[in-house]
Image (spheres, rainbow, N blue to C red):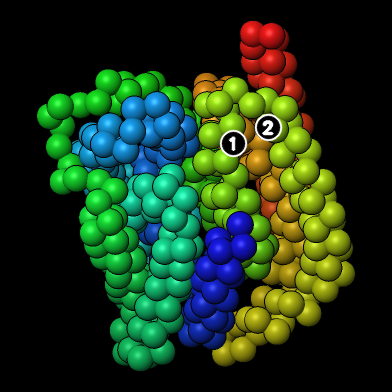
Amino acid sequence: MVIVAVGTLAAKLVGMAKDMVVAAHFGTSDAMDAFLVALALPTFITNVVAGSLPSALVPVYIRVREREGRDAARRLLSSVLAGAIAVVVVASVLLVLFSPLLLRLIGSTFSSAKLALAEHLFVFLVPLILISGLSTILSAVLNADERFVLGAATPVLIGLMPMLFVIAVGERWGILALSTGLIAGYACEFLVLSWTVYRRGFIAVPTLRSLHPETKQVVREYLPMVLGMVVMSATPLVDQSMAAMLGPGSVSALTYGSKLVTAGLGIGVTALSTALFPHFSTMVAAGNWSSVQNTLRTYARLTLLVAIPLVAVFWLFSDVLVRALFERGAFSGADTEVVARVQALFALQIPFYVLGIIGVRLLSATGGNRLLMWISIGNFVTNIVGNYVFMQFWGVAGIALSTSLVYVVSSVVIYAGVRRRIAVHTAARPA
């Protein structure tokens, strides 16, 4: 956890520096709105196709490694990677075909020039789907073998490269400098991870021949995760689309308001979930349910101890934080007032989000991905209703409040599911 936290902290600090540079150059301009909408679609596909795979793969991989040895686990990884590449390529092609319609839906109130810019940026950013998707899978391979350093450290490149490009050529290239730097950052991360995974012999050249029998189990766990991730990953798209209805700069304000909260959550949640997931999977494979319960209680208490004071800090000093980070260049004092309000309401989700992620990892380790799918669907519906109701009263800040309330409700449902699955497995265990 410490290794992952340090690496993630470095990545978040670089990412925050990048956001400060981007805010100074582009503020809440139309170009920034267009970039964020264009980036939303590749991010959505990556989260759906690649982001849900580790939850299905890691428990099965650990079970195969413990029972059949490393050669069998290596075969399993090779089979899964070959299939993942095929799925990512097909998903990318489909997204390109339907992108004009999707961009018009998300940016429904954009002017023709703003929408044209979003379409141009989207075509430029399409390679991110394959590059970032493969990086996610390769990082999961390293984490499954409890090698956490590179997976935690390489995201520094994703923040560093865009910042350097904006500083160097931002005045001449405009928003294209940010897009180019983002692709360069993801490409560098992929090269480092792929070389490390191949050199250490964790995986062979991908092939669909000689599939490991447990590949079918990965697919069975993967399908409900994909469906759930489709719904959950669509939530930011819905939020941005509904924010776009509120007028110019609203999409950017929503994004800036989530930056610091997301960065803080990223450090804690990534450290917890990355380290706990293989730990939970190993205990579940061994049937050690008393240790599962003890670990769950320990980290739930730790989460509340840290998260509640953090929420108070965000609530009391939100405007100070936004002013210090973003208020310069094109980012005005009026922007600070709106973004600070959004940030304070986003911060309410912190303890519930972290508790929910711990529960999600345990449910995935026990094969509860189907339950997670239904929880995701419930979250999606609740979020849309909450957005519509709260934005009537508080504008873009109402969308942030809706997001926080969704995580409050979902954390309660997740822990009810966790308790039930532990009770079922404990009752079924031989004396």
* Residue at the spot 72% in from the left edge and 56% down from the top edge: 346
* Residue 176 percent coordinates (x, y): 32, 76
Q: Which mark is residue 29?
A: none
For the N terminus, the image quarter is: bottom right
Identify which amino acid the numbered label 1 is placed on.
Phe
> Image height check: is 392 above or below 215?
below
Give the structural element (helix, strand or loop) at label 1.
helix
Give the structural element (helix, strand or loop) at label 2.
helix
Q: Is residue 377 visible?
A: no
Image position of 123 (left or right of 325): left
* Residue 101 percent coordinates (x, y): 33, 44
Please name the residue that numbered disc 1 is placed on: 280
Between 64 and 96, the one nearer to me in the picture: 64
* Residue at the spot 46% in from the left edge and 68% down from the top edge: 153
Between 39 and 207, the one nearer to me in the picture: 207
Image position of 156 (left or right of 348): left
Please name the residue that numbered disc 2 is placed on: 292
Between 336 and 245, the one nearer to me in the picture: 336
Identify which amino acid the numbered label 2 is placed on.
Val
